[in-house]
Amino acid sequence: MTTNAVPRTNTLALVGFIASFMIPVVGIVLGAIGRKQITSSGESGRGLARAAIIIGMLGTLIQVAFFSVWLTLMTAGIAQSGLLG
């Protein structure tokens, strides 16, 4: 009886997937490194690495948009209040 060994899941792909929800830039970096390791080592986790990169990119775009809107509103509020002179 032969058993088929399931390839190990790449650790960086898994950690990158989890990190992409909390710190998107880290998720992008770890997903990219994990994907490169998967190509050379034959481990599983290509989908996790791809998801980490995609979710990280979307999260980064959302954070940049949020910061831009926040900065615009703060600047407009300060200018309207007359605090700058």
Image (cartoon, helix red, strand yellow):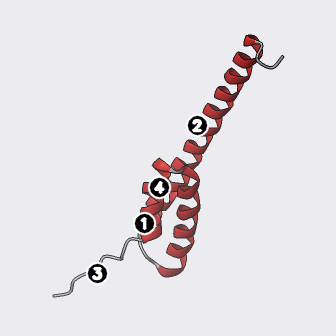
Q: Which residue is mark 2?
A: 62
74 shown above or below 9? above
Q: Which residue is mark 3?
A: 5
Residue type pointed to by label 2: Ile
Q: Which residue is mark 4?
A: 19
Q: Label 2 near label 1: C-beta < 8 Å?
A: no
Numbered circle sitting on residue 37: none
Image coordinates of residue 78 in percent, x first then y, are 73, 19
Q: Quadrant of residue 11?
A: bottom left
| Mark 3: secondary structure | loop
User: Which residue is drawn at the image coordinates 62% and 40% (left, top)?
Assistant: 61
Judge depth for marks 3 and 4 and give the one in front. Answer: 4
Residue type pointed to by label 3: Ala
Q: Nearer the viewer, residue 47 or 72?
A: 72
Q: Which residue is mark 1?
A: 45
Judge depth for marks 1 and 2 and give the one in front. Answer: 2
User: Which residue is drawn at the image coordinates 30% and 76% (left, top)?
Assistant: 6
**Does label 4 or label 1 sit earlier along the sequence?**
4
28 shown above or below 80? below
| Mark 1: secondary structure | loop
Q: Nearer the viewer, residue 34 or 43?
A: 34
What is the spatial separation of the Cα atoms under label 2 and label 4, in whole angstroms? Answer: 16 Å
| Mark 2: secondary structure | helix
Judge depth for marks 4 and 1 and give the one in front. Answer: 4
**Does label 1 or label 2 sit earlier along the sequence?**
1
User: Which residue is drawn at the image coordinates 68% and 23% (left, top)?
Assistant: 74
Q: From the image, which quarter does the C terminus lie in?
A: top right
Judge depth for marks 2 and 3 and give the one in front. Answer: 2
12 shown above or below 78? below
Residue type pointed to by label 1: Gly
Image coordinates of residue 1 in percent, x first then y, are 15, 88
Farthest residue, direction bottom: 1
